[in-house]
Amino acid sequence: MPTPESAPVLEVSRLVKSFAMRQSLLAALQRKPALEIRAVDDVSFTLHRGEVLALVGESGCGKTTIARTLIGLEEPTSGEIRFSGEIVSAQVRRARAGLLSLDSGEVGTHEHMTMPHMSLKRLRQHAQMIFQDPYESLNPRATVFDIVAEPLHVHGIARQRQERLERVRRALEDAGLRPAESFFPRYPHELSGGQRQRVVIAGAMVLKPELLLADEPVSMLDVSIRAEILNLLSELRRQRGISILFITHDLGTVSHFADRIAVMYLGRLVESGATGDVLQRPQHPYTRALLSVVPVANPRLRRERVILQGETPNAADIPAGCRFHPRCPVVMERCRHEDPPYASVGTRHMAACWLLEGPRR
Amino acid sequence: MQEFWSQLGRKLAALWRTFSHNRMGMFGALLVTTAVLVAVGAPYLSPYAPSEVIRDANGRGMTFASPSVHPPLGTDDAGRDVFTQLVHGARISLMVGFLAGSIAMFIGSLLGILAGYFGGAVDTLLMRITDILLVIPDLPLMIILVATLRNLELHISPLVVLVLVIGLLYWTSTARLIRSQVLTIKERQFVARARAIGAGHAHIIRKHILPQIMPLIVANTVLILSTAILVESGLAFLGLGDPTKPSWGTMLNFAFSRNAITNGAWWFYMPPGLAIVWVSLGCVLVGNVLEETLNPGLAIHHLEDESRMVARRPEAAPP
Amino acid sequence: MTEAPLLSVRHLSVDFIMQDGQMGHALEDVSFDVFHGQTLGLVGESGCGKTTTLMAIMRLLPANARITTGQVLYNGQDLLSLSERQMRDFRWKEMSIVFQGAMNALNPVMRIDEQIGEAILLHHLMTRSQAARRVGELMEMVGIPRERAGQYPHEYSGGMRQRAMIALALACAPSLLFADEPTTALDVMIQAQVLELLKQIQEKLGLAIVLVTHDLGVVAEVCDSVAVMYGGKVVESGSADSIYNAPQHPYTERLLQSFPDLNRPAGSLVSIPGTPPRVTELPPGCRFEPRCNKRIEICATTAPVMLETSSGHRAACHLCQGPAARF
């Protein structure tokens, strides 16, 4: 069980990622400011070695964007990402070019530039991503062997055939596909959803990364298959001490093996804390609502479900005040105008809600 | 490497199985195969040399002799055997069509991949070039190009000129097609995965994009071949071919200019015309079926086959 | 239940002729009943035949499928003996279906209200203005705001598309609604909204619903009775209560155990090893036997028969019958 003292594997500070909307010619001529979609708006968190952090939220809250930014598929608009203490250098380059403002205010200073930094290429040897759709994330025309060996090939590791065979075999076995050799020549369409996801995990583990970004790894699998994959991830964490950022919209999936939970809404974190704390003493109304609708396999259980009306608003149209206020079941007047601060509500338990200040209702 | 060949073998076998069930496709394949065989076996099939004049019992050239047992397709205005010219013409037509088509496919695929994958300025530039070429009418442009190249006295064979001109102008539709496919593939999750792993552009194009568009390229090649043969025939008919090595189009040119029509010598202009149709049709049929087979999304399902839906009389229900 | 069921599927078997000529037994001897105003959950892993069952009932199977035996009795009438023409009268007017993957089932170039209107006009002798009014009613029933009714499918979010699909399915006021994985690929919150909507509609219209899903949580939320399918067969059926609290079949037990439960103490989730059998390679005895943790000798050789274990609760397992019965 990781302690606060164990070295942080991932430190995200004030990350912002905006997408600019295409402007019509007319609007451009009128010099109107381009519409900006802030998919990720000032998010900070830390992931320690061997820890599993669950990032929970509905579609459109920005959690996938965070994962894509961390792995380098998107460039951050501002903010800092550190991996094992080293700044991921795509940002350093942009900072130099004045395109990126690092909040520390040390942009361009000699001290900042001499801090150790790592390239995206190196980052990808230490951090790997697992995508959501096991039917789509595998090249249908590549064999299982090719798929799992690809990271080795790309990074020029294990060039000898024998070594490569060995590493792929180990990766497949660790992912639970035995006998590994029988899977080498097979194609994705010959495998079940669960097996495919294991191939994806094998492909992610073959480089022995320290960090795994799992984007909804079980959402597209049958409920009965989810257990296998979750157990596998849990096992990998236990054996290898890898850290996992587990992204999902379903709290029920993570309750079993996440150490900490962070809840996102519309680009911001609204609550975070140890799993036990968040599940048993949820502070934010959104967290409470999410918890109340987690499916339960018991028809006799009559529970109070807080079914929020409507959908997550468009990120281009963020409500004023507290972003959650239009859907909040306990909204107050203050919430419509002022954005609550993300503050501490317990031991390493944070939440952003006006209800937490002063007398409770 | 061995694996690659055995895989390929398996894929071809599977392809053949589905293909062979399609009557249209098989018919088309038959047409194309016979044409190719004729072209290959031309010297053996033709009873005479192409420029040999057939003389009758009196030693005079048999001009515009009508078809009979011998010669089977009659003679042209100079007494040369039409059948011989036909089979030799097959060689020229098919070869020019094949080479020109291949060049067009290669250029089209390359540019389509580059435009689709890199997007941005590369895409815009290539697509504007494509648009310009698409806008200019083909035939006048080709006539001008061929004529210009010939006048430059570069001592290139007229057939080579034809191959180049057709090849360099007919890649546009392929480029567009490939580009739009690449755009779709680029967005698929397995490409994102490859990028997340850290793969570079060359790797992604080679291992992820190319295998996906290969079926499309293959199917499209066959169709482009058909177009190339037709275009070559058209240009040759206009006199831009090589008269010393007549293709079917050139034969039509001769027939026209040497008054075969007014003389009623249908055996001179109909066979080459039919031959062109024969091969083009064959290629199109094969190409369509290949496209359907290799791209399962295009398959047509029959919704209303009643005979298959109704249950037979149910057996007595078990106790 | 003394009243007659609205839909009674009896011993339905479906075979598929695969591309290479092999015969796949997709469904075998499937039987269940659906009563007025009740929801039946058809539960099972992907590939167990649940969607095929729906398609067979609606007579929408692909060309290479054959219904080999069985009856589908709707209000006593056997649908399988009807001609295609007669069947069209049933489709949408008596029974309709909310397809899996709403995006693919909606026409992307037609406005939503037009599509629903089309369904109405195809079946009823309603005038256009009457149909338009009905479309408005339906939209309100499913909670789509009026001002968005004229938009295109791509402008809708996943949850809204699902609502549109439900409105479409209700267009001709059917008595029986099939819902094929209506909440898969939706976020939990939207899932809760859609299920709530289905419950409300059922209450309001007295609909019977057959809900096909792999998600036990969904079934527990809305279903009155459950039929569990595996390998093309129904292995257990009964009321939701008895299935969840006293499962008889080992497969049902394992399914329930593999479901993540917030209230259970943290620990490893139970998973079912192995994969379901292919329709062309079915085991000779019980189809679940290779993966069963409670198998006995007879299971590999003889297929168990569906027998009643307690009132209204039936299971097909050797362990529930005869001297080896567990109770």
Image: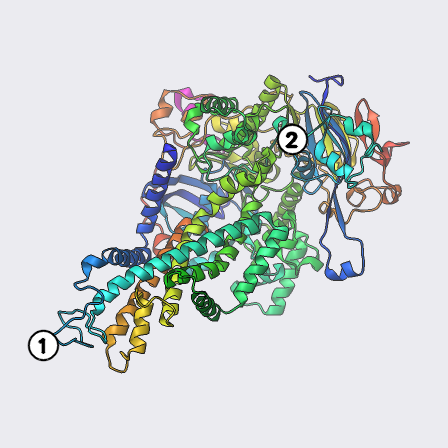
Mark 1 belongs to which amino acid? Answer: Asn
Give the image quarter of residue B225: bottom left
- Judging from the image, what secondary structure is the residue with disc 2 in? helix
Give left or right: position of A164 versus C224: left
Q: Is residue C310 magenta?
A: yes
Residue in the image at 73% along x and 38% along y = A76
The answer as to whether the residues below labels 1 and 2 share one chain is no
Looking at the image, residue B279 sits to the left or right of residue B67; the answer is right
Instruction: Please determine whether, in this image, residue B234 is positioned above or below residue C276.
Output: below
Q: Which residue is mark 1?
A: B58
**Against C293, is A62 above or below?**
below
- Disc 2 target residue: A252
Determine if the magenta segment contains residue B133.
Answer: no
Give the residue at the far bottom of this rendering.
Answer: B262
- Camera sees residue A343: yes
**Dot 1: what SS?**
loop
Q: Which segment did they paint magenta?
A: C309-325
Lateral position of residue A242 relative to residue A96, left or right: left
What is the distance, in whole Å, between disc 1 and disc 2 at their CAs?
Answer: 102 Å
Find residue C64 and report its horizontal and vertical position in percent.
37, 49
